[in-house]
Amino acid sequence: MAFFKRQHTPQVDMEHLPRHVAIIMDGNGRWAKRRGLPRTAGHASGAETFRRIATYAKNIGLDYLTVYAFSTENWKRPREEVEAIMKLLEKYLCEAVESMARDRIKMAFFGDLSPLSPRLQALCRETEEISKGYEGFQANICLNYGGRDEIVRAARAYAADCLEGRADPNHLTEADFGAYMFSRGVPDPDLVIRPSGEVRISNFLLWQSAYAEFYFTDVLWPDFSEKELLKAIADYQHRSRRYGGV
């Protein structure tokens, strides 16, 4: 049995993990279609995968996990599918509120929550409020999020501060501008993972992922396991991050 493990378990240096891993949770619909199930079944399975991976990420010592749950473009999907996703989010957050004291997983939301239902907005606020009492691992959920939209919102907010005299455009730095992002206070991702076989970032963390390492896999998100996460981290640990240097 030990030989099987050596052959099949990715070798990961647990003392040098990436601090922040981001994941584009993709492939739910195709996972369901391959099984002759409605797309909503894929989203339900994907939600369970997130729950499992978030708990595992905390347990192995990651500091941050950011996931792409619903993009600004996802509103274009069929109304029934969007409604099903929102119901799943409500269900998950209701359960999260009940389990947060036990699991001590902090949660934050990146994105414009105003188009969401009052119930869902209230649950997001409640989970973030509960999270203020916890230290350590944090799960960030990108909800009604788009990378370009985030940058435009930041630019508007910065311009408003300039007009009001609270900011000086002649002394703007990247750190200053980053403070206007949804992700302010959170370090940039070290590793961005995209399951499902697609090789693009789909408007995800455009500002923050400037120097992230990317890992693509054909595994669909509902099938993404703890072992798949370790494979991505092992691959990351074999790369040289030079940040433009030599």
Image: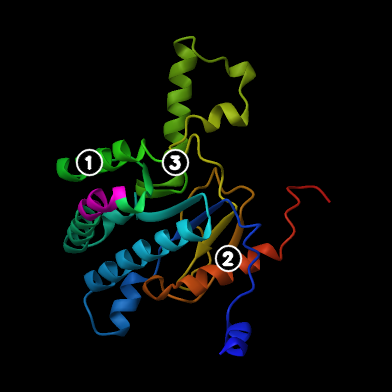
Q: Is residue 62 above or below residue 195?
A: above
Residue type at mark 1: give it.
Gln
Residue at image position (43%, 18%) is 160
Displayed quadrant of residue 134: top left
- Residue at the disc numbered 1: 121
Residue at image position (53%, 15%) is 167
- Residue at the disc numbered 3: 135
Residue 227 drawn at (x, y percent): 51, 74
Residue 99 drawn at (x, y percent): 27, 53
- Name the side, left or right, on which 233 lies relative to 196: right
Give the spatial CA distance, label 1 vs label 2: 32 Å
Question: Circle 1 — which element?
Answer: helix
Question: Circle 2 — which element?
Answer: strand
Residue type at mark 3: give it.
Glu
Within 10 Å of disc 2 (Cα), the crowding (few <14, some 14-19, many 20+) is some
Residue at image position (57%, 72%) is 231
Residue 111 drawn at (x, y percent): 36, 42
Residue type at mark 2: give it.
Tyr
Q: Which mark is residue 215?
A: 2
Residue 187 drawn at (x, y percent): 55, 42
